[in-house]
Structures are given as C-alpha cells and as structure tokens.
Image: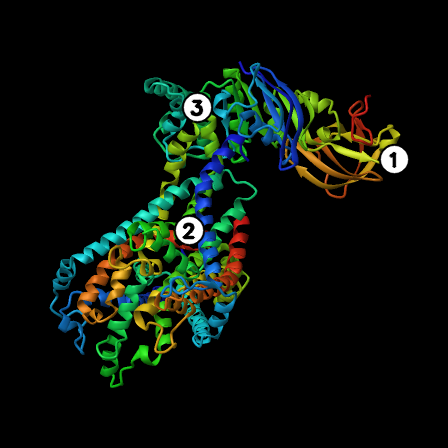
Amino acid sequence: MARHVSNSRKAVVTALAWGIGLLIFFPILWTILTSFKTEGEAINSHPSFLFFDWTLENYHTVNERSDYLGHFWNSVVIAVGSTLVGLLIAIPAAWSMAFVPGKRTKDLLMWMLSTKMMPAVGVLVPIYLLARDTGLLDTKLGLVIVLTLVNLPIIVWMLYTYFKEIPGEILEAARMDGASLGSEILYVLTPMAVPGIASTLLLNVILAWNESFWTLNLTAANSAPLTAFIASYSSPEGLFYAKLSAASTMAIAPILILGWFSQKQLVRGLTFGAVK
Amino acid sequence: MGEIVLSDVRKSFGGVSIIQGIDLTIKDGEFVVFVGPSGCGKSTLLRLIAGLEDTTDGIIAIDGRDATRLPPARRGLAMVFQSYALYPHMSVRKNIAFPLRMAGMPAAEQDRKVEAAAKVLNLTPYLDRRPSQLSGGQRQRVAIGRAIVREPSAFLFDEPLSNLDAALRVSMRQEISELHQSLKTTMIYVTHDQVEAMTMADKIVVLNAGRIEQVGSPLELYKTPANLFVAGFIGSPKMNFIEGAEAAKHGAHTLGVRPEHIAIAADGPWKGVVGISEHLGSDTFLKVQVDGMGPLTVRAGGEVELHYGDAVSLAAQPGKLHRFDAAGHTLSA
Amino acid sequence: MATQASRTASRLMLSPAVVLLFLWMIVPLGMTIYFSLLRFNLLMPGTEEFTGFENYFYFFTDPAFWPALVNTLTLVLGVLVITVVGGVALAVLLDQPVWGQGIVRILVIAPFFVMPSVSALVWKNMLMNPVNGLFAAIARGLGLEPIDFFAEAPLASIIVIVAWQWLPFATLILLTALQSLDREQMDAAEMDGAGPIRRFVHLTVPHLTRAITVVVLIQTIFLLSVFAEILVTTNGGPGTASTTLTFLVYMQSMLQFDVGLGSAGGIVAVILANIVAIFLMRMIGKNLEA
C-alpha cells in the first residue's frame, strides 16, 4: 500500500539519501577514478575529480605483471572451489535436516553454528602446523579445504532455511505419485530449490573471495589469492596510487557485481535466518 | 479393487501414543470419512494407510495383500493433500502427468490420459499454466486430476477443502461426490467438519484421541450415537446435554436432545426465557435459558417471531431423547 | 514424521557434514589446548616440555596483553556504536520513498563487498596518507595542518575503516527488519492518535530490537577477529597502540614462533568469543522455534 508523501518531502529525503549514499561509496569511487589517472596525477596535491587525462596504462601495467592474473586465478579457484565442495557436502545434510527432522536436528544445527563462532586465531597454530606437515601450506588445495570447513556451517544453514520453505507435502505427493528418492530429489526438490542454492553459492563465493585471515596466514608466493596479493602492496608499492587503484578495482569488481545481486540473500545468510 | 483392512494398527511418536489400536474394514468402492476434532489422529491414520508414516504395530492390508511395509509408491493409492501439494515449477499438464511419467508410461499415452482427465475436471484451458496462476478451486481440481490419472485402487483425501471459501467448498464437495459416483473407486476422506462427513460419506468413522468411537452410516450415527462424544460431534447445531434432576427423572446421568427435536408448545414442561435468537429465514435458532436446566438450543420454524426476553414453554418430541450413563455410554431404550 | 527408510537415508546424508565439522572443531582446538600447556618454540625444535599453565601466566603478564584487551574492546565497541546508530538512521532514511532508491541502496551496500586488504590500503594510502592522501589535500585546501592519522590516532583510524566496512551490513539488516514491520499496526497506531515520533519510539524501535541484537552479536563475532585491516595499516603499532588480541596471538605465534604462548592466547580468545556466542545462539535458537 503506497502512502501518500508530498513531493517536496520526497525531494528532501532523496537529496539526503543520495548525499549519504555517495559519501559512503566515495572511497570506492575514488579508487576507481584514480585507477584511470597517471601516477603523477594520482598524487597531485590538488586532486581533480573528473577532469584529468584518462588512461588505461595502469591496467596494462598491472596485467602485464603476470603474477596479477595468477593471483586472480588463485582467488577464483579457492572461492569457487571451496563453495562447490561445501555445497556438495551441505545439500544432502540440509535436505535431511529440513525434511526428516529428528529430535536432535535443532541441537545439531546449533552445534554447527557454534563451530563458526570459534575465532580463527584460536586454531591458527595447529592448522598452520597441520598444513605444513601435510604439504598443504601455500597450496590452493589447502585453502579450499580450510575455507570449505570455515563456511560449511553458513552453507548448511542457508540451504536449510531455503529447504524449510519447500512444503514437505509436495515431496510426499511425489512419493505417493511413485517417485523414488532419487527422482524426488532430481525432479521435484532440486528445481524448487535452485533459487536458494544459487543464492547460497553466490554469497559463499563472496565470503570466500574476501576471506582474509586464512588466506593471509596460510599462503606465500605460490597460492596467494588477491587478498594476500593486495596486502603486499602495503609498502612500498602502495605509494604507486594509480597502480594500486587499478589492482584494487580489478580485485573488488567481480565481487561488487555479484554482491549487488545477492543483497537479499546476504541478510538471510549472515543472520542464519534470524532476519529475513 | 480397493479393499483396505486395518488390524490393530498402532502409532506412537516418541512414546506418545497417537493411534491406539484401530480395527477397520473399508469395502471396495466405499466412500469412508474419518472425522474427529483436531489432534484425534485422523490425519495420522490416513498417512499410515498412505505409507507416509511407519506403523508402530498392526497390519494394513490392501486388496488382501499385506502392505504394512510397502513404500507409498507401491501401494497403488493416490492422495490429495490439504495444501494441494502441486509442483510449482511444472505446468498443470506436467503436474497431472507426473505419476504417469514416474511409472514410465509412453509420452503419447500420458498425453491422452492427461487430456481425458482435464476434460472431466474442466481444466483443458489451463493445461499450460503454472499452479500459481490458478484459483484455489482450480488447484484443487489439478490435485484431483493428478490422483485420478493413476487409476489407483483407492483415493486418500486429507482435508482437501479446508483452504477454500465456504461457497466453493459446497460445490467442490458435490464434485467429489459425483466423481465417486462415476469412478466407483474406494475413497477415504479426512475432515474435521461433520457437515462434510454427513453429506459425502457412505460410512463415517468417528475418531477421538486415537480410538474409533463409532463406525456407521451418517443416519445411523445421527439416530443412534454410541456415546456422548459421537452424539455431541454429529449434528448441527450440537445436541443439548442436560444433567441433574431432569436426567435422573429419565433414569440417566445425562440426557441428550437435539435442537430440532424440541418443540415450542404452550403446555410444554420446560419453561424458559429466550436469550439470543438467530433468524436465518429457513430456520430460527433460539438460545433458551430454561429454569433449573440451563441453556438449551432450539431449532424453531423460520418465521417464528420470538425475541430476547420472551418467555417460552418447550417440549421434547417423544422418542427423541438420548440417555447416557455416567461413563458417557448410551443406555438402551 | 517420516518412515524408517527415509530416516536411514537422512542419517547417511547428514554424516559427512557432521563428521567433517566435528573433526574441524575438535582436532585443532585439542591441539591448541595441548600446545598451550607446552614450552614450544618453532625456532628451538626438540625443546618442547610440559609447563602446565606457565604460558597462560606469561600471556596475561605480557606487557602487551592489557593494551591488546583494551584495544580489542575499544575496537569492537567503537565499531558497534557507529554501525548501529548509523545503521538505524540510514535504514529509516532508506525506508522512505526516495527517487532512485535501488541505486542508493547499491551505493550504501558496496563497502561490504570490498575485501579487507583493499579497503585498508585505500583508506591508508589514498585517503588518510598525511602527504599524498585526499584528506590531507582537503585539509591543506582549508588551510589546516594535515593529520597523520595512523601515527596520531591509529586505533581510531582503524575503527573508522572497519566501521565503514560494516555499516552496510547493519543498514541492510535493519532495513530488512524495518520493511517487515506490519503496516496495519502502524495504521492502527495512527488511528489511535500516535504521532510519527511516538510511533517510532513505541513501534519501530521495539520491532528493531531483535534485529539490532542480531547485528551486535554477529558483528562482535567478526570484529573480534579483525586482522587484515591491522596488518595492512599499522601492524599493531605504534608500540601496542593498535594491537588487538587476535593480532597479538598472530605476532607471538607467526612472528616470534612461540607456539605455546600463542596457543594460550588463542584459547583466551576462544573463551572470550564463546561468551558472545552463547548469547547469539540463544537468540537464533529462539527463532528456530518460532
């Protein structure tokens, strides 16, 4: 139901909202703009907003350093890989808990959540030593394993809240209609759950892409994703603002775009269904 | 064929006994209604027959074969759910065809059967729509269509009309009755609404707290309820129950008399004052506060002009009194 | 509510997730507890010996411990206050009819998707740098002396960066909660003669309480382990001015290779986080029943 609001009031609110929105977005906007400047322009003590000589030179430079693409690829493998493995483990588990709940299902869910509450630093040393001793330190596989486990509770929870919304009667109807367990999951559950699975995938790729504790502590040169690569700019290369901006823009752009698509799911996923 | 025999069927959930030993024979082609208040176990009983729940004890036989341990798909039954349980991502056509597809029927034959069912149910124009684009009544018919194409040995209905509005409920009720007349297939129908039970059933099974209270035709239950529970549950408005001196006069602990069996008579023995009166046109329902007996509901003629505060005298029609003992059992006349 | 067959299938499908998470929880935690009772330095292999609670004693008496604890609490509380107050204000603003609402939402949410190392670098170099940063340029433009943020107010600067990252999260959740507010309830209150302010105080705020609690608890979990922002900007300094518990443990175990001491610190962090977690779990558990 639309409430009547006078246009003048709407104009004031609009101006305010846009002003604050742009202010919050400004650091990102500034980074994107700077990435198109020359290094000299970027540190100009009278910075210009739009009226400078736009150049793609920084992107060329950053891309030519082949290690940038390598780190980008590491990020993709680690984020997508850990999400897919997580989904593979989580879909059957969430199916069980949503459609065949037992007396302990709730406790089990809460316990899964509790593993997420453990601060990473509390287990940093053993994980580091285990990774070192198994040869998984500074490998993509090692990070895929760790991030799968780190995000598994969120994946299970998100899928659980989505599966919960599929009425059990529909699955029972399929059973009455002669569907086997396999057909039930293939023809009825999966098509109905696809939107939920897709948003779970999206949110977890975002979380894994930005994860900055394990990726910084468990990698060195070989498997460092963008989080670690960008962190290496902290000095002294960070003083090359334009190149830093170009690298940053490329590191955040894919996730920024994915993220904007997944706003709604984000709330549900990160609050474990407590706010919808 | 569709004879279903339950022998001492029991079900408990985590130590709580929901179904406490049901023996029941449903004959082929019969329309049986399970009725009872919510929580009486009627839906659970239906789900046990469907195979959606395991029995804790007892035997369910379908057409003479022990089906107790068979999965739902192999019992040859079809079910219509309260929420219709249509597959939202499939068209009406695919919904109805789903059980045939699961049975591995050739596509051409599937089409033929779906078209035929759609014709019977007036769904032909909607075959390519999604369930979300249909009205409640249409969805209900799709659910029924999905059930009839399987040509099951029995249909199971789980409160199928409770999501429809009152007018639609009456017409769907008639459609289901007509369907039963034309198919002659066994139907088991669960409802909490005794009007649905009375209007549709060949045989009513009244359930309460996981037990059968009484089994019989609608009129049998109406005329000779076995106990207080059935007497109070069947019939609308509810039977009046009178305790105390008036009951003792008739040698009973509780006396029952239906509102339609009380007459307004100038020389009637029960004197009272009219409280609320509901004028429906066809009938008038009066709430009469009778001296020494409490309130009685009385069904009077449609054009009776009685209002709040009027004094009336009432008399029970002879031979229409029901007598119950202290345990609630009917005393024989 | 199911048959024996489906229960068996369900148990089979549940077990991989349960077993993996159980191992993930119990093995490292057990090792951390064990290490925390040892004298164990990676630079001196072969000298491990059981020392009881000595590491805990050293951890608590480390001159960096109290500053780290205070910094951790300051960081968490500072960010929470900024994001909750700012989040409520922004959510209420964005709940109004606004031209281009979708775009404003996108602008406001964006910082949440920026990886911590990028946001830390952008703020550190391009905005807060005392020589070449934009803030310095603005200060000079206004005729003021530029501030060296990370030297003069390292913790406050980090709080600003982290708050910028988490404000979108708070806003988004509070906005979602706000939109689920029953309009009929609002209309009823208006009929009852409650003005906009009283409607806000008596209906909106109680309705948001739950969402605010969720925001506070979830952010606390994440804020207790803020790491990249500190590593990139100040490295915990100057001195211990911006060292948090997480960063202290990282320094002890990864830079000084004192595994025993780091493990003791890790256990302390686990205990702290668990206190928060218990409240969070109660909240979500209640919701599960509803």
Q: Position of residue B274 (x, y in %)?
A: 76, 40
Label 2 SS: helix
Closer mark to the observer between disc 3 and disc 2: 2
Q: Secondary structure at mark 3?
A: loop
Q: Are marks 1 and 2 on the same chain?
A: no
**Residue where numbered disc 1 is placed:** B245
Closest to the observer, A254 or B313: A254
Residue at which label 3 appears:
B121
- Label 2 marks which chain's residue? A
Q: How is the image coloured?
A: rainbow
User: Neighbour class for label 1 at 10 Å: few (<14), some, many (≥20)?
Assistant: some
Query: Eyeballing the image, is A188 above or below B62?
Result: below
- Rendering quarter of residue C150: bottom left
The picture places residue B81, in percent across and down from the top left corner, at 51, 31
- Letter of the chain that mark 1 sits on in the rendering: B
The residue sitting at 39% across, 56% down in the picture is A127
Circles 3 and 2: CB distance less than 8 Å? no
The span from disc 3 to disc 1 (Cα, nearest Å) is: 57 Å
Per the rendering, the mark at residue A154 is 2
Viewer-nearest residue: A183 or C260: C260
The residue at 54%/16% (across/down) is: B2
Judge from the rendering whether residue B250 lies leftward or rightward of residue B22; answer left or right. Answer: right
